[in-house]
Amino acid sequence: MKRILLPAGGAILATGLLAAGLATTAQADDTVASDVLAAEAKAIETLEFWTASNNAALKNAVAFNPDALEVSQIKSGGGYSADTKPGSTAPIGEEKKTTVKVQNVNLPKTIGKVFFEGRDGKLYWCSGTSIQSQYRNLVATAGHCVYDIAGNDEVVSRWVFVPGYYQGKAPWGVYVGKQAFTHYDFDVYEDFDRDYAFVTVYDGIGGVLNKETKVTPSEYRAHVAKGGKGYVKETPITAAEFAAGYEKYGEAGPYKSAAADPKVESVAKPADAAQKIEDYIATGVNGIKLVGVEVTESVYKNATSGLDNGQKFERLSNEVPVSQEEYKKLVDEKGDGKFLGSLRVVKDANGTETAWFKTQYYVKKWIKSTAQVKYWVEDYFVVEHAIKSVGRLGDNVGGQGFAWNQPSGKYVRTFGYPYGPHLDGNKPFTGVTPKWCYGKTAKNALLIPSKKVEEQQSLKCTVTAGYDGGPWLYKYSNAKRLGYVNGVTSLIADTDKNNRYDTITSAYFDGETAAIYKAAAAVWSGKLVK
């Protein structure tokens, strides 16, 4: 089809909530229509989603490989008929020229992975590239890596581009998609003759989201009191470690204990209590343990001394100094009946308070439980953002040029991250590092009826899923690592029926493609971190 509706403000890439599709915002022919990927608030949520826990979501994504991309019937048609004169836009960010050997390929900095959440809730990636634009903020990829191909006219969720992605690392930052541009026929009719998209992205974000820092208990409480985020990690320890830590830090410290079984019963004093008293207090003997039960001062004073239940536990019942703040808090708690001990304050000759003390009183209780008493130490962590804006995509990695209505049968170099298996189950690629193919595009257009394809271009290349969305670079300079995007991988096909992919295809970039690209290239996106 030769009709076209351009995205006026671009498509808003959804990040949890989806925007209306192009069909609902389309105006008349030859006008620019609109479609959005992520407003700023949702863009922040998208960024946090992908980068949380040291980029865990990025690491868990898999290559997008829907059944809809499997191609079984391919025929060659006639040649291409350009709709306008050939044209091109020069690349940006030329690198220093170097002497290189033929086929010793220098990978372009512009390529990377496109990550998104599909309609099925699963996390996927395709390939993509930075491309020249007015605001140096544009990514080229396949249309099916941006627009849902399940027939519901929606964009995918949580779309980001990571140039140079490598095993969870984002060397030049993470770029959240803001607006997506594609052809009306792909968005509405899933016409793979128009399987391409241009996405504007916000300025990149580097650094660490949700940075975790270990702090003291008091620092943690102060951070949380101000509304900050944090968490407490519990690590099991021995009874001896607990005793040493508790003696050093007291109740306000990180050393804690609790009976693992709430069905603890009281028992009589064991016959060997006097001989093994230290063991009964520290770890217990045969499941029996001597513990202290807090009581009021009057109950404690009326108790007798000894080792029986209810007798004084002198070892725990000592006066300890406290801060003025804690003293005031305990005064309030004593008034509410929450604090059973006694309080004492020391004043100087002028009546000024100089020291504060508390005493808690304990009596002995012999208990027996089917489970050991648990001991643990608490580590306190605060969670903060330690991120910064790394600037515009094109300023950081450059941008490939763009070419349209170029003749077929010309050499191109394609790039991408293959990962999926061949039809026979063989899986030769890891998806970790980018691969490339080089050769002449076929002179005849492809006909693929199942995808409404009447004029895709093709190239012999034995890659697999994950490579889709990657650029086809015309006139690629191995020295500059730059060329002209003249296609993006759309379909991956087995043309000789041996159950191994041998051909990749791309939409033919014509004057309508150029119009969509130029509309996208003129749209500003902005920053997420000011």
Image (cartoon, grey):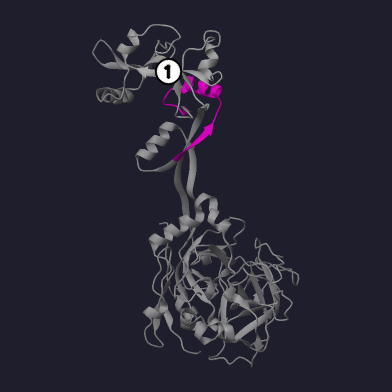
Q: On the picture, is 100 further left or further right than 522?
A: right
Q: Residue 12: percent from the left, percent from the top?
A: 42, 70
Q: Nearer the viewer, residue 47 or 107?
A: 47
In this rendering, is residue 390 above or below 371? below
* Residue at (48% x, 32% y) in the render: 378
Residue 235 lies in the magenta-colored region: yes
Q: Residue 227: percent from the left, percent from the top?
A: 35, 43
In this rendering, is residue 99 above or below 285? below
Name which quarter of the figure residue 421 lies in: bottom right
Q: Residue 144: percent from the left, percent from the top?
A: 53, 74
Residue type, mark 1 in image:
Gly
Name which quarter of the figure residue 100 lies in: bottom right
Neighbour tally class for label 1: few under 14, some 14-19, many 20 plus, Cα within 10 Å: many
Q: Residue 90: percent from the left, percent from the top?
A: 56, 77
Q: On the picture, is 79 further left or further right than 384?
A: right
- Count of marks, rendered view: 1
In this rendering, is residue 429 above or below 90? above
Q: Is residue 150 visible?
A: yes
Residue 145 lies in the magenta-colored region: no
What span is in magenta?
231-257
Q: Residue furthest right?
A: 101
- Tell me the residue that label 1 is attached to: 292
Q: Nearer the viewer, residue 120 or 261?
A: 261
In this rendering, is residue 89 above or below 329? below
Q: Nearer the viewer, residue 197 or 82?
A: 197
Which secondary structure, mark 1? strand
Q: On the picture, is 489 further left or further right than 305?
A: right
Q: Quadrant of the C terminus?
A: bottom left
Q: Is residue 170 visible?
A: no
